[in-house]
Amino acid sequence: MSGAEILSLVGIIIGLAVLVVLVMKGINIYVVAFIASIIVAVFGRMNLYEALKTDYMASFASFVQNYWLIFLTGALMGKIYEITNGAKSIARVIVKLFGKKYALVSIPLACGILAYGGVSVYVVSFAVFPIALEVFHEADLPRNYIPAALCFGCSTFAMVAPGAPQIQNAIPSSAVGEDLMAGMVVGFISCGVILVVGCFALMRMVAAQKAKGASFIAKPMDVFSDEDTKLPHPLIAFIPLIVTIILINVKINGQVICQLETGVLAGSVLALIMMWKYQDPSKLLGHVGDTCKSSLNAICNTSAVVAFGGVVKLAPAFAAVVNAMLNIPGPKILSLAIATTVLAGICGSASGGCGIASPLLGPAFVNMGIPAGVVARTISISSAALDSLPHNGYIVTVCNGLCNETHKDCYKPVFVVTVLVPFIGTLVAVALFSMFPNLP
């Protein structure tokens, strides 16, 4: 590397460090991403005005243009399931089916089914939390493990499974021209491994705490759900989710019935019609307006990180960095997995990691002869590991905001089931893809 490239590499490293540290300290992501971009541009001797005005904003705007409708329709689906209590209906019936003995399995499974159906992970968490609180209270399980149960169900196996209408599945697929079912066989096997290993790990950790005398200790703000709340029948609540999955994945003459945004919107409308009587029509437009605001805020948060990546990719050292990632010793698909999960960890976001890795690394690995479906599924699954570090926005929201737990009390089990376990699933995917690259 030349002296200019080495200086640029130092700038990239410092910029990434600043991004991680300041986000963990709670500084606004827009400010942090802008500061980190300036550092990269200055060290790379780039035209600062052009780096921010053109490179940063072009990447920011491009991500919004390409994916806002996905964020919007997903948020709309979530809002409808929130205001109609459809999410609670599904979660409650699953919990009842498993009973107290398998409470730790029922909560992640309820979250996973809702997330796989297209409901926003934030909405799923807020909808299932009151039910998890009841279950943990009745089963006398340590309260500080609720965040792990929620985060595991929402942000691992269901988020990246083939066919899931989640942004972490959509970005890699579209980047290499594949559909949402890309890498289906290995994808389902890997996600199944994540589900089984994660549930086992969660149950073992709780059992160890119970053996030490841990029990449920309520917090002053805890309010237990009202069993008399009028909920739609679980079957009615399930139907729109099933219809959504069919619309965006089933093909006729080689073409899916609906594009992702259209299918999720159709499922949302169907959910609203079928559960109309469980919401207040006079507040509907207000809910839609709130959904537009929240989805725009969500995608702009991710776009700020992706835009930082847009500056990084034009830095003098970036070509050398990409070349190093492409030449990590071992199977090429392992290099892709490592690069993606590292980027997701740096961003503190699976979608942010996908947003950077997919357009930059996806086509490069396809050009190396790796099937596009393998590339898409590898990026998707590997984005679900290091993304869940302490500075991840979703983790902070669930642990501190929703569950009112500190990172000190609850993050260790969260780390096990949302970082270590998905990493195991990623290794399974890499191994299977390496041995059987031509599986559908």
Image (cartoon, grey):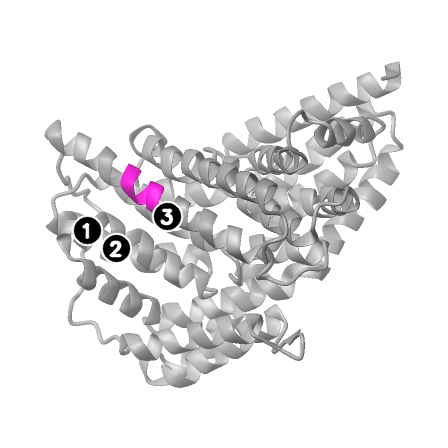
Is residue 253 positioned above or below 58 on the image?
below
Q: Is residue 344 visible?
A: yes
Helix, strand or loop at mark 3: helix
The residues tagged by marks 2 and 1 sit, at their Cα atoms, a distance apart of: 6 Å
Residue beneath disc 1: 102
Residue type at mark 2 is: Ser
Which residue: 37% across, 39% down? 417
User: In the figure, is residue 358 to the left or right of 400?
Assistant: right
- Nearest the viewer among 343 and 336 is 336
The residue at the point 19 percent across, 58 percent down is 98
> Distance between the Cα atoms at labels 1 and 3?
14 Å
The answer to whether the residues at label 1 and label 3 have Cβ atoms under 8 Å apart is no
Q: Residues within 10 Å of mark 2 (few under 14, many from 20)?
A: many
Position of residue 321 in the picture relative to residue 45 (left or right): left
The location of residue 4, given as percent across then percent down, is 87, 18
Instruction: Tell me which corner region of the image, top left, top right, bottom left or bottom right, holds residue 253.
Output: bottom right
Quick one: label 1 or label 3, which is nearer the N terminus? 1
Q: Which residue is mark 2?
A: 106
User: Which span is picked out in magenta?
Assistant: 195-201
Q: Is residue 423 above or below residue 94?
A: above
Measured as percent of width and height from the top left, residue 62 is found at 75, 55
Check disc 3 and report the residue beneath it. Answer: 195
> Sequence-wise, which precedes: disc 3 or disc 2?
2
Give the amino acid at mark 1. Answer: Tyr
Q: CA distance from mark 3 to mark 2?
A: 12 Å
- Mark 1, residues whose alpha carbon is within 10 Å: few (<14), some, or many (≥20)? some
Q: Quadrant of residue 318?
A: top right
Q: Secondary structure at mark 1?
A: helix
Question: Looking at the image, which residue is at 62% across and 35% down?
Answer: 343
